[in-house]
Image (cartoon, grey):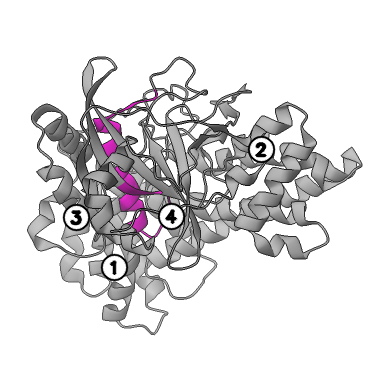
Amino acid sequence: MTEIAFDHSYSRLPDKFFIRTMPTPVASPRLIKLNFDLVFQLGLDNRWLSSAEGIDMLAGNNVPQSADPIATPYAGHQFGHFVPRLGDGRAILLGEVIDRDGVRRDIQLKGAGRTPFSRGGDGRAALGPVLREYILSEAMNALRIPTTRALAAVLTGETVAREMSLPGAVITRVASSHIRIGTFQFFAARGDIEGIRALADHVIARHYPEAAAGDMPYLSLLAAVIEAQALLVAQWMLAGFIHGVMNTDNMSIAGETIDYGPCAFLDNYDPATVFSSIDHAGRYAYGNQGPVALWNLVRLAESLLPLLADDQDKAVSLAQNALATFDAQFQTVFITGMRRKLGLFTEAETDLTLIKELLDTMTKSQADFTLTFRYLSHCAETVNDDERVLNLFTEPGAFREWLARWRARIAHEPQTGFERRTAMRHVNPLFIPRNHRVEAVIAAAVQNSDFRPFEELLTVVGEPFEDQAEFAHYAKPPEIHERVLETFCGT
């Protein structure tokens, strides 16, 4: 059996980029879940990770000789208000590995104890948020949305004090890096141009090597991050996902979904939907996610201005031109994705109207986002399945009229009903990790130490596009008494 051989490209940066920090040992770690698919992708030894020595590493009790544990500083705009010093308050990066595709991946323990950036917190994680992140991140991966992933979850054998005493846990998070917009802001806030430059060079080498080939590599870096974020957030919205806390410190430079806190998936479609208990003004509502992503990217551009040009006005102009591409890129991904969800193989000028009319009708009739698109795929092949989707609408008449316009639109394309249905089922999931299901999993684990619902939900959301007849009940929207309207960070 072989322990992990870590590399450390980030900790080869100057000392101001991190503080070496050892995890705090826990009382009696016990493995909840090891992600064998990810273990294989990372080229790791599942026998060692499943052993007592491996579980000790996943809990922070055993630090391999090749590890170099660090916590990193960053700043961030939190709900629009700038905080100049944040950082990894309960996360410790053990090191990096090169996966089977040649991609460098961070391996980080979240909930591993206090760090110099804990700001008075205990640095620990409760079981509930660990299970939520595990489920949501793996569901996003199955939906083919860029994301950090969960390698393992372990119980610590200790309790953490929140509103009440809760079981403690540690999640091992894997990311292509943990560098954030807020990481750049940290150095920009201190006027540390050389720090910004070193960080930018590292990000280019690690994530966007093609940017180094041009005459203006830092402008190319900005453009690449803009494109990555436009793609990511549009994909979120096509799946009905709401991040919940799109602060600049929660936005990955690599274009991956990171920091699963009060996140959730839509049940009924409404662009004003907010689940996060701390988002009182709806800043991060479902429909605001595109504009907020652009707002965050403006903050990144501000941090990069000293690298774009010596002349301030020229630097601002270059940044503005790059930022001006976001909306078109976002809309292209979103509209293209919507065409695929509607089973359209070609483009027509009327498509935007068709999409908008459907979303407006869904809002007015409180139709379930996920099931509307999934059930519509059946309508592509036969009118006999119309009632299933019509039953999702409180005012089915308006949707029936839309359905007639959709059928008139697809009649102009040569694909068969079977071909269209097959294509639609490939992009419209049947299963998502619905709020009430996630909360039921957490309750079973926290209150009864029962992890069977957790395992079952992971199985279901791991195959979101398959029918899975034995788990059909997981596709159903919540009954009124089951609805979860508020989610929490859990920190």
Q: Which residue is mark 2?
A: 184
Q: Is residue 99 above or below residue 151?
A: below
**Disc 1 to disc 2, how far (Cα)?**
40 Å
Comparing labels 2 and 3, the label whose residue is closer to the camera: 2
Q: Mark 3 vs mark 4: which is more N-terminal?
A: 4
Tell whether label 4 touches label 1 (CB within 8 Å): no
Label 1 sits on a secondary structure element that is helix
What amino acid is found at the position of numbered circle 3 in the picture?
Val
Q: Mark 3 vs mark 1: which is more N-terminal?
A: 1
Comparing labels 1 and 4, the label whose residue is closer to the camera: 4
Q: Which residue is mark 3?
A: 460
Residue at x 48% of width, y 47% of height? 95
Quadrant housing residue 43: bottom left
Residue 412 vs residue 420, the one in the foreground: 420
Task: Using a 10 Å C-alpha cutoff, classify the residue at mark 1 as few (fewer than 14 neighbours), some (14 to 19) or many (20 or more).
Answer: many
Q: Which mark is residue 425?
A: 1
Question: In this image, 441 relative to 113: left or right?
Answer: left
Q: Which residue appears farthest toward the right when viewing the image? A: 311
| Image coordinates for residue 363, horizontal then vertical, percent | 35, 43
**Disc 1 to disc 4, how far (Cα)?**
41 Å
